[in-house]
Structure formats: C-alpha cells, structure tokens
Amino acid sequence: MKALIVEDQDRLGRFLQQGLTECSYTVTLARTCAAATDAIVESSYDVVILDLGLPDGDGLDLLRTWRKGGFQEPVLILSARDGVQDRVKGLDIGADDYLAKPFSLEELLARVRSLVRRHSAVKQVVLEHGGICLDLLSHTVTLNGKAVDLTSREYALLEVFMQNQGRILPRTLISEKIWSAHYDVDTNLLDVYMSRLRAKLEVPGKPLFKTVRGVGYQLL
C-alpha cells in the first residue's frame, strides 16, 4: 500500500512517515503543494494525508484542483483548523475524512485503514467511457456493445486509462503499471501500443486519446 503525506512541518511529517512505514505502507513525504502535485502525477497512491496550511498554497485549493482533474483516491485532511465549518468545507470539497490536530496516531492509522477498506470495496467491476465497457472480472472489452479483441498488454493499458479518466498520465506512470521490468520510456514501445488501442477503439472524427507532448497521454 502506498501513502502520500503532504505536511510542511518536518518533525510531524517524519513522525507520520515512521508510523505508516511501521504499518507496512510505502510512504512519500511532500512539504509543498507543488511537490504533492508532482507526486500524484508521477505515481499512484492508495491514500493521501493532507495538511491545509502549506507554504505555497492552501490544501483545500489543492484538493479541489485534484478532484477536478479526476483524482479519486481517498484523502484524509489533517489540520489545526478544527471548527465545524472547516470540517464541513473540507468534506464538501472532496475530502473523505477530516482529523483535527492534535491527534492520536492510533486513531489516524485506524482512519487510514478504514478509508482504504471502503475505497477498495466500492471499486467498480465494470468501467465505462464513451461507449467502451471494460469488465474487470471477465477481462473483456466491448465498444458500443460489440466485443473488442485486445492483447493482455493492450487490455492492461486501457485499464490504466479507464481507472484514471480525464487525468493526464505521464509516460513513466503508464509504463510503471504496464511493464513490471525496467522500461526505457524514451523508446517508442508505449507509442506503438497507443497506436494499436486507437486503431481498435477510436471512431473516425472522434479521438479517444490525447497526446500531451513531453508528458504523456490523456483519455478524453
């Protein structure tokens, strides 16, 4: 399980990092809005612990931007702002839970476990987008009701996009999920697979994928 901690206080950040690491989480610590955004672009996380008072912006604005960009992973706000209206605002913007400082590490870990369980339980079995239906149980794909024959790599690539609809996915992130061995993203292997997906799934005049030069791809 991977966790992202967004906390600018060095001592608290390291305390949280140690607590989660001892519970077998792989932890990334970001101290600014910019670093946190870079982190979720470069990798995927099972849970995010987000402070609100960050040196280069407000955590609520950051969360709002993430949600608008298609980021759906569970977020626990950890903040000294403990008023009822603060909690309501945070939850309305898109947080899955809200814990005020000071806090008990034991309670925080329990809330994190709860968020991860709930998120895993509600993951969709069938993903749908633009006439495409991807069945995670049968590993089949249909386009407007007609079966589409995909190789295992093509299916895995499509699943990454269907799980991150609307997000711009960097080449490194896509490759990390598709190729378990070391993969040189400077090669054209990913581009070859993207061309295959386009040929099998795109309707003339209606592009399905957008190439973001110098970054990666986006499912439109």
Image (spheres, rainbow, N blue to C red):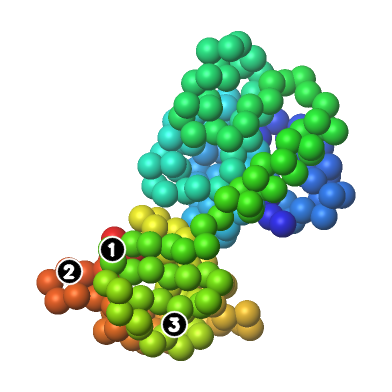
Tag 3: residue type?
A: Glu
Taking the spot 29% from the left edge, 83% from the top edge, the residue there is 200
Quadrant location of residue 82? top right
From the image, tell me which residue sits under label 2.
206
How busy is the neighbourhood of tag 1: few (under 14 within 10 Å), some, or many (20 plus)? few
Q: Position of residue 78 (x, y in %)?
A: 66, 28
Image height check: is 79 above or below 183?
above
- State which tag comes first along the sequence, 2 or 3: 3
Pick whichever of labels 2 and 1 is earlier in the sequence: 1
Most extreme residue toward the front is 145
Horizontally, is 145 left or right of 114 in the view? Answer: left
Residue 218 placement, left or right of 115: left
Foreground of the two, 10 or 127: 127
Callout 3: SS: helix
Please name which of the two marks, 2 or 1, marks the residue nearer to the observer: 1
| Residue shown at the point (41%, 86%) measured from the top left | 150
The answer, for residue 63, to whether it is visible in the render is: yes
Q: Residue furthest left?
A: 205
Question: Alpha carbon of mark 2 to alpha carbon of mark 1: how far?
Answer: 10 Å
Q: CA distance from mark 2 to mark 3?
A: 20 Å
Label 2 element class: loop
Circle 3 residue: 154
Split into 4 quadrants, where in the image is the C terminus? bottom left
First in residue order: circle 3 vs circle 1: 1
Which mark is drawn over residue 130?
A: 1
Q: Quadrant of the N terminus?
A: bottom right
Tags 2 and 1 in contact by the CB under 8 Å rule?
yes
* Image: 119 above or below 220: above
Q: Viewer-proximal residue, 10 or 198?
A: 198
